[in-house]
Image (tube, helix red, strand yellow):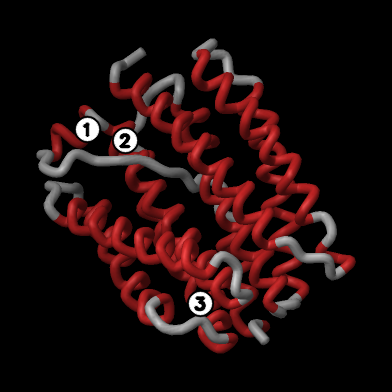
Amino acid sequence: MLTKSWTLIRHVFGITSVIFIMLPHSAKAQEVNNEIGLFFNQATYQCMLTQQAIKDYMLLGVEVDVAETSVEMDESIKAFENMLKDFKKKELSESLKSAMEKLDQDWQKTKPFLTKKATKYGGEQLLVRNVELYKSCSQFVETVAQGISSRHKNMLMATAKQRILAQQMALYYTAYTWGFRDPQIEDALSKFNKEFHVGVILLGKNSTNVADINNATKKIKSHWIYAKTGMSKYHEKQFVPHLVASSMGSIVRELNKIVGLYQDLIDRGV
């Protein structure tokens, strides 16, 4: 069904430096540099929102928690666009402006499908369009990341990447549940699963000794057990999209806390 686009999809899935964060409403270029952790957090969080919104569309397609899912998708779309408006008010470098404009263009091509009733055709189109959208999100995030110089940079990036992986796993698992059974979707699920598991191990090895980070990491490990168990049955055609989406949502909330803590360490120059 999606064969023509999967060569590009496989290339996009190879991107390894995707992450997430938040920017003040009015900041000059110098202020952006002084709060690069905050900027990076917002840019990567915005990227995660794109995957969350498309995941919600898939959940609506399989009629899971329709009322709650509809609210989350609407809020994700609004949050993404509000962040984009804030970015456009900043005095950014030419490379950041270019990356942001490409992101905006790809979002405008994707959004119309998100705002319509969930259908198989719409789901197929979103899976295809998500390739370019995710690629442009990643490029914007990578461009922001170039401004970070901190010993906490790698952990910040790894933690932020976990956020997007969590939503991507829920997205493609739900798409598979809905009937999108292309082998490439299974390959993507397997890849995301392995990357996320490695990321969980990495989070457990952090050397900051920050109690809040350690506590959040323990909760993530617990939620990951539930999610992984639920996803492991899809080969047997046993689907639990509610459990997977709920567990991944809990994981993302804990990851948001950790990203915020690393952001604070970076912006305070610790």
Q: Which residue in the structure is indicated by mark 1?
A: 33
Circles 2 and 1 in contact, beta carbons < 8 Å: yes
Asked if residue 193 lies left or right of residue 220, the reply is right
As shown in the figure, which amino acid type bears the numbered disc 3? Leu
Residue 225 lies, with reference to residue 233, above or below; the image says above
How far from the left and from the top, in percent, is residue 73? Answer: 42, 64
Tally the numbered discs: 3
Q: For residue 147, which numbered disc appears in the image?
A: 2
Residue 205 lies, with reference to residue 243, above or below; the image says above
Q: Residue at x 11, y 42 (%)?
A: 26
Q: For residue 126, which numbered disc appears in the image?
A: 3
For marks 1 and 3, give the one nearer the viewer. Answer: 3
Give the class, few, some or many, for how many residues have Cα within 10 Å of label 2's Cα (few <14, many ≥20).
some
Q: Nearer the viewer, residue 39 or 12?
A: 39
How far from the left and from the top, in percent, is residue 37? Answer: 33, 32
Quadrant assignment for the N terminus: bottom right
Q: For residue 132, which numbered disc appears in the image?
A: none
Q: Assign a secondary structure to mark 1.
A: helix
As shown in the figure, which amino acid type bears the numbered disc 2? Gly
Give the mark, 3 or 2, whose residue is nearer the N terminus: 3
Q: Residue at x 52, y 43 (%)?
A: 252
Q: CA distance from mark 3 to mark 2?
A: 32 Å
Q: CA distance from mark 2 to mark 1?
A: 7 Å
Give the mark, 1 or 3, whose residue is nearer the N terminus: 1
Q: Nearer the viewer, residue 158 or 177?
A: 177
Residue 193 lies, with reference to residue 266, above or below; the image says below
How far from the left and from the top, in percent, is residue 120? Answer: 59, 86
